[in-house]
Image: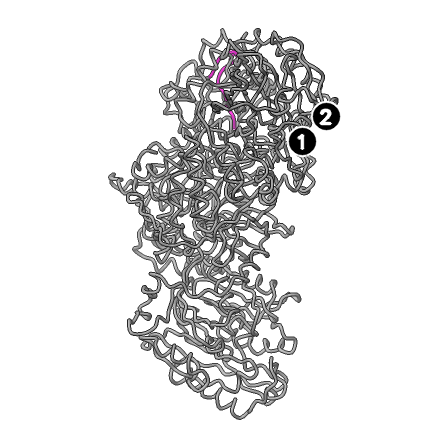
Amino acid sequence: MTTESGTDSEAKQPQENKETEKGKAKAAASQQSQAAAEPSSPQNQPEQLPAAVGHSTPARKEQEQQEEDQESHRSSISRLSKSPLRGVKKVKIMQCKVSLLDGSDFTLDVEKRARGQVLFDKVCDHLNLLERDYFGITHKDVENQKNWLDPSKELKKQIRTGPWNFAFNVKFYPPDPSQLTEDITRYYLCLQLRDDVVSGRLPCSFATHTVLGSYAVQSELGDYDPEELGSDYISELRFAPNQTKELEEKVMELHKTYKGMTPAEAEIHFLENAKKLSMYGVDLHHAKDSEGVEIMLGVCASGLLIYRDRLRINRFAWPKILKISYKRNNFYIKIRPGEFEQFESTIGFKLPNHRAAKRLWKVCVEHHTFFRLVSPEAPPKKFLSLGSKFRYSGRTQAQTRRASSQIIRPAPLFERSASKRYNMSLSLDGAPIMENHETLMKDTAADGAAKVIAKGDIITTVTTEKKAEEEKAEQEDTAMDEADTLEPTATTPLRHDTKDTEPPAEMVKHQTNISELKRSFLETGDSTPGLTEWEKRLSSSPAHSPRADEAPMIEPLELQDTKDEPPAGEDTKEEMEPKATEAAGYLVKYVADSIVTDGATSSGPHGISLSTTMDDDVFMDGTLREVEEKTPDSQDEVSERSALKVSPGAVRQEVSQAIIDKKGTLIILKEDRLDTEGSEMSILGEKEEPVVPGEPEAQEKDSLSSSIETETIKEDSAVVIEAQMTVVKTLSPKIDVKADDMTQNKGIDSPKKAMASWISEEVKIEASEVISVSAEEVKEVMKCDSLQQKAEFFTFEEVVQTEQSKSIFTQNSIPESSTTTIAVSTLGWVSSSQKAPADPEQKTVLATETEEGPAESTGPTLQSLENSEVGTKEMPVVHTETKTITYEAAEVDTNGDADPGVLLSAQTITSETTSTTTTTHITKTVKGGVSETRIEKRIVITGDAEIDHDQALAQAIKEAKEQHPDMSVTKVVVHKETEITPEEGEEED
Amino acid sequence: MAGLMAGFGHYTHAIVRGIPASLAGEALRSSQSEVDIAGARREHDAYVEVLRTRLQLEVVELPADESLPDCVFVEDAAVVCGDTALVTRPGAESRRREKEAMSGALKDLNLNIVEMTDENATLDGGDVLFTGREFFVGLSKRTNQRGAEILADAFKDYAVSTVPVQQGLHLKSFCSMGGPGLIVIGSSEPAQKALKIMQQMSDHRYDKLTVPDDLAANCIYMNLPDKGHVLLHCTAEEFPESTKVFEKLKDYTLIPVSNMEKVKVDGALTCCSLLINKKGNN
């Protein structure tokens, strides 16, 4: 149910009081039971709505609407008008209902803007639970799918509609529950498992039902006592999806034998049995393989399991997976090549929809991090990264074990409440709980040691797993049981460099389906028994004690994962990666190293790249989060600012939210629905955002011009472009790399890729070949994959011409320009004089505000591209529909461009804001004795139609002028891109 | 308590069946060969005697049925794990009726019987490798996906992974369990490939014991009270090199069992008995 405090006037009242949130008075005492304890303040009177009421009344909705508007950047004017009122603060309180594991509901109040963590903490406090990291809170979305609340995000952002109802659940099932520190934790885990069993999510045999049931009874009711319990006590409890009298009798038989067993002991026994079940802790997701066969993907502690019906048809242990990514409704995993396989393969799965794909991806990210890493990895750095920056930020299992070993409180007394839920007939949908979210832990810094390792990788990379993880993997390899050996190893990050394996990388990737994979698996040559340390260490079984004098007979069956050890060079590479972002030089070096040393992808052998693709809604998500959510402080800052200034922060949030929550990336102008290949998926986004083809264009055009003219008026409007500048030199070096070797960094070429090297490579798989070709020909700019659909680019170029000479050195290597189209546009400006006349899509001439006079519309940029000497090869592969509008100052003469002049210096600066990425590329050239400084700003805006492009453009122009008062804006290129190509698009990210 | 992951290799009962005279001429075989029916019977008697006398299992001996030439290979007719028995639908049409006697015997043992009734499903027990932790089901000429699915449904506690069988009759024509967590595997390429698949599919770790001869990799492991690890394996006469490998196993009671005649009709050691653990159950 939803409850909000406040009155109609609240719309005008800002809610951001983040900083004071904690201290703030909460719900009114009259609220609800558990929440009653919280202090109340007259200002924060929660309204009580009947539980049955869904969301809110229409009137209320309107309010919220307004509220949303406040954060949207659509209308700066209205925002301005509201600003003055922001002084009044009022906190909205929402009533939340959380279903606990024992079937009871816990009602509490939280501020509407509270983050998930607040709710989670309150629930855990209520439960007296310290080992919290295994748990999470779920919320059912409109599709009735369970989503894990992201602790770092505001609740209201995560609950789009409907009542604020949640459930407290186990998120990460510990492979060895006996290692949990407290009984109370095991108790909750038991409750979860009982529900899993009863619901059918955790299938088990009749015999197991009886065993589990009997321990559950012992735990909950204590010793068998017919007098006290009555004869039919057992029927009141639920043990199985289809509970029979026979089962109950068996349970009772066993129960009788447990006299004297404490509840805690019973729970341990329960867990010892439950953990062995093959589906224990497996989070299932419906999917189809590339051939359209219905399968299930199961995410668990050890990796990804593929089921067809009830049969396991494949399994990919985490170490075997190089990268996971999703795009639209597709989910991809890139698989490390097997022992005798040369190539990595990428396997794609179709999920029912985009949200499902994203949910699966997130669950994978979280499980991998939790179970495989020593410490969570930081989200990708702010620099041009595309795709979701979602990362699991809670404690890993290793960390939580360490932390819980510090628990010193006496074992809490707690009552094992009668589990009401088992008395009721539940809906036994086997619906898996999906999607994990990060748990923002208080003590992220807890593992200093481990952290160190993590720090560096953050950036670029395709999110390699850090070394810590590697070592862990290592450890695992040596250990008998993966699950059981997940002991924290963080403190001493040792690396094994001993094993090699990876064939030198050729990045030819294969898109395979499972069966193909299997086939290839079969085709791999015979493995001579891996003789390594394993050899010496024979089976643990007493029966197989090794004898020195005899040839080894029993060999440990090496798991695939074991064999794929990080090549020695790996480490170097990983270390280098972070640096890459800092200096081109390093990058180059790094690249070189990686080429030499590992054939793997840019991500480390053990690394898994988590990526989403640009056209994904999630696209800017990461960026946003970084800004607003990553550090609570920054968040506050943002909101603060927004209050003052028409709320850029709010805009961001809004945008990000929109991006995050909506399916499609919405491009204003065009839909990418053209995607032929994605046949199956109807993207929700489409529906959500009706775009009227054609019209928007015109509109945009108009508004664009107007925005330019009126930019001064909008001074206070959202500052889209942040000041933060980071030097990014990544692109070109990497590109070079490609030229040499297709391998790893394919991601570089496309803007997205460029920005975030971690972007899925698999996507590029098909494109890769193409890329390589172009790589050779094109010097610095590889823009093969312009696959990024929907991306819209605004290019601003400011050129200061110290003299009359117009020679402009166009450097195509600008990282972000990676897209072909973009690069093109850049070029176009250079050779504007040669522009081909009308391009159907060409816009009308638009006057720029520069004093330079009427702008001249440039022809299709592609045309100009051809003319420019920098000539980049266009990739035939990419079928992207692009629209480029160039507003160029007439005086700019690019004719002389045949001579690029001498490049004195070039630098690229990138900054990101919510939905935009701004790259400033400054080149200084000397040509004919005239020096010229040219600044190109490239702003990439991705996302849905809600982004106010006009405003962004105007803002960017304004800012550019402010920043460089002595320069003039000579050209504005608006480039809009929509992907047409289905297949390639899919492949590429 | 019941069932879940009871000690691996613990058996109390064995179901065996006599050899019909029709075996010599009509039993299915992958290569032409003359079977000495008397020799086969001698072998089988010795085999049963080991189970009954030496290992003290309670042996249920079903009478041979002349209309079922392959009936001695009882392993294919049912899969027993814990207190559940799945009566299969053998891939070979001529063997479908073997289940009748088998069902009766299993019922007499108070096992929970699951019948594979799906007309589209086939499964031979010889394609089912139970490791104590999970099942591997060979997809072979005799066993199909549907059969494997039904098996998975019958034994819900365990992961059931499918493994293509590219050579040989059954999955267990080149592998078997040699102990807890120990897979005995032949050294042929198909065998090794199958093993690789198994290792990839598994959450568990296994050791492997590679023997030169694929057929020798089919052996019978038991863990019996007072006897500890027991392994019935091929004789040196048949597979000298492989036998040497077995002989290196320490702490095992090694029992070579001759199988020279039955092997001619693709019968391996495991094929000739269905082992059941009824201790503690029912």
Magenta stretch holds residue A157: no
Question: Mark 1 is on which residue type?
Answer: Lys
Q: Which residue does the numbered mark 1 point to in the structure image?
A: A687
On screen, residue A884 above or below A614: above
Q: CA distance from mark 1 to mark 2?
A: 14 Å
Residue segment shown in magenta: A1-15
Magenta stretch holds residue A10: yes
User: Is A712 on the left or on the right of A372, as rendered?
Assistant: right
Q: Magenta residues: mostly which secondary structure?
A: loop
Mark 2 chain: A
Q: Which quarter of the rendered picture does the N terminus of chain B lie within?
A: bottom left
Where residue A168 sits, quadrant-wise, is top left
- Do we see residue A196 in this rendering? no
Total of numbered circles in the picture? Answer: 2
Q: Residue B130 versus residue B205: which sits nearer the camera?
A: B205
- Do we see residue A523 in this rendering? yes
> Judging from the image, what secondary structure is the residue with disc 2 in?
loop
Q: Residue A936 versus residue A708: which sits nearer the camera?
A: A936
- Mark number, residue A333: none
In the rendered image, residue A325, in percent from the top left (x then y), is placed at 53, 41
Q: Residue A356 versus residue A863: which sits nearer the camera?
A: A863
Report the residue at 58% width, 54% height from top: A514
User: Is A295 on the left or on the right of A225, as rendered?
Assistant: right
Question: Mark 2 is on which residue type?
Answer: Pro
Q: Which residue does the numbered mark 2 point to in the structure image?
A: A693
